[in-house]
């Protein structure tokens, strides 16, 4: 608000001192003693008000002449503000018509030829008539009288208001000295107080001129109060912004001083908290079996943190890094148990079946026992849900006496979850592999990478590509984590990945792993698993004793056959839990119930059977075949339906089918057309009839070549009007040459067929070896036919005679 005015070293010692605030002269100067014609001094960017003393630098030639003339005479000069400050040589028309007569208190000549004046405003005047403008501007003036305030009480109130607001502005403004308050408080004339404040207000020149031109003292004071109020609001806003900006700095300074005080207190009590932490880390580092490179990196970071202020943000980052280094199990391993008999016993206790996997683990143990050291294999268990892939990893860890850690990869998108973040980022952490090893405190745990086929990929990176280094035995000896920034040996870790579908795993990643297929469980296997594991588990989970509930083989098989339809045993586990809850309620309420659960009890508790297997053994019409399919969730049964209607030989295929399966339909149809004469199918059957082929459950996508012979059989059955033999299912790929090719997932398909009540299965001759791998007990009651050509398929699958009421093509 207030402009700083300095009047140092201007008034000489031999000059009589003139008071800075000459109120009496302003009030009492007689108009008759003042000249009527005045030399005019134009002011470029200021307005002089009566009673106010200001310094002015005069540089324009015409203005210097006016000042010298006045100074040599009576020292009175008229001061008028310019309308436009850009005008260099103003004429009378360029000036306002109202100004202030001033007395020249002092004039000093400057080295550049200009003059510095000390002027004191005396009284307001209006230009009556402009005289000459050369060599100086002179004007005839008329002096103006102020209209005084009549209400003394109101005058005092307004004066107090002016002083209060001005004092507040002085307090809020850092550039105004506090001595300005003393000056304000010593002014007792309201007109001069208003003029003094106006002169020092930081407002526009036109606004100051308007105040000067106002005759009514009350109105003039009101204008000054308005501008004061605006200035006060501005200063308060500036102060608030300044205080907010200082808050963060003050907080940091406060924390710094508190930290310094805390350190001083700790030192007085006999210890430094930060130094104690560093000493703890150094002591733990001495026990580590790390390499020279790791020790060097630890020493370097330790020396760095010593020179750092504990209040600095980076201090905690380095401290956390050092803590990770000493917590990691560098070359620290658990002792493997090489007792193969014990290992086999533990694996058999926890899991029924799965002989291939158990043999592979025992082989690994045997080589480790003989050689003493070997790189751990990278295993990948592929199989449907619920067959025990993840839990098998825990059993392997128990058999080896190793630590167990599991990391779920399902839905993982960010590569840094594997490799970690760089320390420069806020909230950086090591990858989950390093974190897991730190957690188990061992460099040779059994490490389960669960659901590796469900790893995502987006703009944040490709985690499956980051896993290439982890799962490569030739590279994982020097695994590099972005946070750790050091090589870590993962070669002693036994990595076991699990997945439902091998096709979803990246090819380069698949190549690095030893794939072990886990098939679904047969009815006999599920029965044994239920007897040995599930019944006891659910009984214990529901607080029941062995003499309070019993399930025999018949009840368990009834449950499996009628209330579950899966490759694993998760659904079986859930329905058993339902039975146990019902029994627990009866025990708790002391109701009578059957301790030995019968099939009738199961129906009462669970309701009617959920799955109907009779539909697969129905006497299906011509054109309907039963195929066998493989899914990531196990084997399944697939109906192939076909029908004809009068038309122009159009083909329609429905059922949410993939391209490969659609090609099988076209291949089968082409083959049938080529063999139409041998099959006794008239040519008009293909030209005068529309063919529609449908695979039910249209909401589920279906694809693959394994339904080829089922499609061929269904279409041949339709066109020849010969039914397909009941209880018969088919699986195999077809070619235009009439050959039948082998397909995969045989064990899952066989188990699905047995669950569905199928009695005969037609497969490719090359799939015979896959059937031989299935235990004979699991396929008891099934008859297999192995074929090489499509003619053999039709001979085995179709009835000899046509049906009654056959379509006449």
Image (cartoon, rainbow, N blue to C red):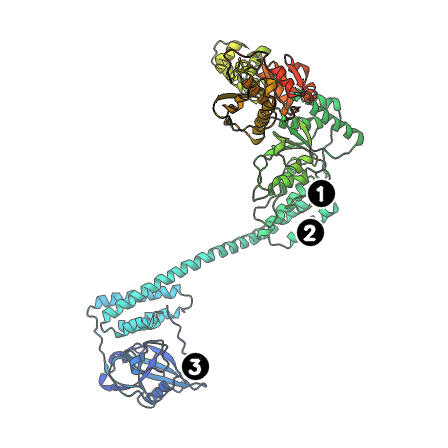
Secondary element under disc 2, as helix, strand or loop, is helix
Checking the image for residue 758, the label placed there is none
Front position among marks 1 and 3:
1
Q: In which quarter of the image is residue 469?
A: top right
Foreground residue among 616 and 694: 694
Q: Does the CB distance between marks 2 and 3 fall below 8 Å?
A: no
Residue 446, x across and y down, in percent: 68, 32
Identify residue for label 2.
300
Q: Earlier in the sequence, mark 1 or mark 2?
A: 2
Foreground residue among 246 and 453: 453
Residue 91, x across and y down, in percent: 31, 83
Identify residue for label 1.
478
Residue 425 drawn above or below residue 799: below
Q: Earlier in the sequence, mark 1 or mark 3?
A: 3
Q: How far apart are marks 2 and 3 (CA)?
A: 64 Å
Q: Quadrant of residue 720?
A: top right
Crowd class of label 2 (few under 14; some 14 to 19; many from 20; radius 10 Å): few
Q: Which residue lies furthest to the right in this view?
A: 370
Residue that appears at 34% across and 66% down: 166
Identify residue for label 3.
9
Front position among marks 1 and 2:
1
Foreground residue among 737 and 196: 737
Q: Is residue 119 left or right of residue 736?
A: left
Secondary element under disc 1, as helix, strand or loop, is helix
Residue 776 drawn above or below residue 258: above
Q: Which of marks 2 and 3 is nearer the N terminus?
A: 3
């Amino acid at each position: 608000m207030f402009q700083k005015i300095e009047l140092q070293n201007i008034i000489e010692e031999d000059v009589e001192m003139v008071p800075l605030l000459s109120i009496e002269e302003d009030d009492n100067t007689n108009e008759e003693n003042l000249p009527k014609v005045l030399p005019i001094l134009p002011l470029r960017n200021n307005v002089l008000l009566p009673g106010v003393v200001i310094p002015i630098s005069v540089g324009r030639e015409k203005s210097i002449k006016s000042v010298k003339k006045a100074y040599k005479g009576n020292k009175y000069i008229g001061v008028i503000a310019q309308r436009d400050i850009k005008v260099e040589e103003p004429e009378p028309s360029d000036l306002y018509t109202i100004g202030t007569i001033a007395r020249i208190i002092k004039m000093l000549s400057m080295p550049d030829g200009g003059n510095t004046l000390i002027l004191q405003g005396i009284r307001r005047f209006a230009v009556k008539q402009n005289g000459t403008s050369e060599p100086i501007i002179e004007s005839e003036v008329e002096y103006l009288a102020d209209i005084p305030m009549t209400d003394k009480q109101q005058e005092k109130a307004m004066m107090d208001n002016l002083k209060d607001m001005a004092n507040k502005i002085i307090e809020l403004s850092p550039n105004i000295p506090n001595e300005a308050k003393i000056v304000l408080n010593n002014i007792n004339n309201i007109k001069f107080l208003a003029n003094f404040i106006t002169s020092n207000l930081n407002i526009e020149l036109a606004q100051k001129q308007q105040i000067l031109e106002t005759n009514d003292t009350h109105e003039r004071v009101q204008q000054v109060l308005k501008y004061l109020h605006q200035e006060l609001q501005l200063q308060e806003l500036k102060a608030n912004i300044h205080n907010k900006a200082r808050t963060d700095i003050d907080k940091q300074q406060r924390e710094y001083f508190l930290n310094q005080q805390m350190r001083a207190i700790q030192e007085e009590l006999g210890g430094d908290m930060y130094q104690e932490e560093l000493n703890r880390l150094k002591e733990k580092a001495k026990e580590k079996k790390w390499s020279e490179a790791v020790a060097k990196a630890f020493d370097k970071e330790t020396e760095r943190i010593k020179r750092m202020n504990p209040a600095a943000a980076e201090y905690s980052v380095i401290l956390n890094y050092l803590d990770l280094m000493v917590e990691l199990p560098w070359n620290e391993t658990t002792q493997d148990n090489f007792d193969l008999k014990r290992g086999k016993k533990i694996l058999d206790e926890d899991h029924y079946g799965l002989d291939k996997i158990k043999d592979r683990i025992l082989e690994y143990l045997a080589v480790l026992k003989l050689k003493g050291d070997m790189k751990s294999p990278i295993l990948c268990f592929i199989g449907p849900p619920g067959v025990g892939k993840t839990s098998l990893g825990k059993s392997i860890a128990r058999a080896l006496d190793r630590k167990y850690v599991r990391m779920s990869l399902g839905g993982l998108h960010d590569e840094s979850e594997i490799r970690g973040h760089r320390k420069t980022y806020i909230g950086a952490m090591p990858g989950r592999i390093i974190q897991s090893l730190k957690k188990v405190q061992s460099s040779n745990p059994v490490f389960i990478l669960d659901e590796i086929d469900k790893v995502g990929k987006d703009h944040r990176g490709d985690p499956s590509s980051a896993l290439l280094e982890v799962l490569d035995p030739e590279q994982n000896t020097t695994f590099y984590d972005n946070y750790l920034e050091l090589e870590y040996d993962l070669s002693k870790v036994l990595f076991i990945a699990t997945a439902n579908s091998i096709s979803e795993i990246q090819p380069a990643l698949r190549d690095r792993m030893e794939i072990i297929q886990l098939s679904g469980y047969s009815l006999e296997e599920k029965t044994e698993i239920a007897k040995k594991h599930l019944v006891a588990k659910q009984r214990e989970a529901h607080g029941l004793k062995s003499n309070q509930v019993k399930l025999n083989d018949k009840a368990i098989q009834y449950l499996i056959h009628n209330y579950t339809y899966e490759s694993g045993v998760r659904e079986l586990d859930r329905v058993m839990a339902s039975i146990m809850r019902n029994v627990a309620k009866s025990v708790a309420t002391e109701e009578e119930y059957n301790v030995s659960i019968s099939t009738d009890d199961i129906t009462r508790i669970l309701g009617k059977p959920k799955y109907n297997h009779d539909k697969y053994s129905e006497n299906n019409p011509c054109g309907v075949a039963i195929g066998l399919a493989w899914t990531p969730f196990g084997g399944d049964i697939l109906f192939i339906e076909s029908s004809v209607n009068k038309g122009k030989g159009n083909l329609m295929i429905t059922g949410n089918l993939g391209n490969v399966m659609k090609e099988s339909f076209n291949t089968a149809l082409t083959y049938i057309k080529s063999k139409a004469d041998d099959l006794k199918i008239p040519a008009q059957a293909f030209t005068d009839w529309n063919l529609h082929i449908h695979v039910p459950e249209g909401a589920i996508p279906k694809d693959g070549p394994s339904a080829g012979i089922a499609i061929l059989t269904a279409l041949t059955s339709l066109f020849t009007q010969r039914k397909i033999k009941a209880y018969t299912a088919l699986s195999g790929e077809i070619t235009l040459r009439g050959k039948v090719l082998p397909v995969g997932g045989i064990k899952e398909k066989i188990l699905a067929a047995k669950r569905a009540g199928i009695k005969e299965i037609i497969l490719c001759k090359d799939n015979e070896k896959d059937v031989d791998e299935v235990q004979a007990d699991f396929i008891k009651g099934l008859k297999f036919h192995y074929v090489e050509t499509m003619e053999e398929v039709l001979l085995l699958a179709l009835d000899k005679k046509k049906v009654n009421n056959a379509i006449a093509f």
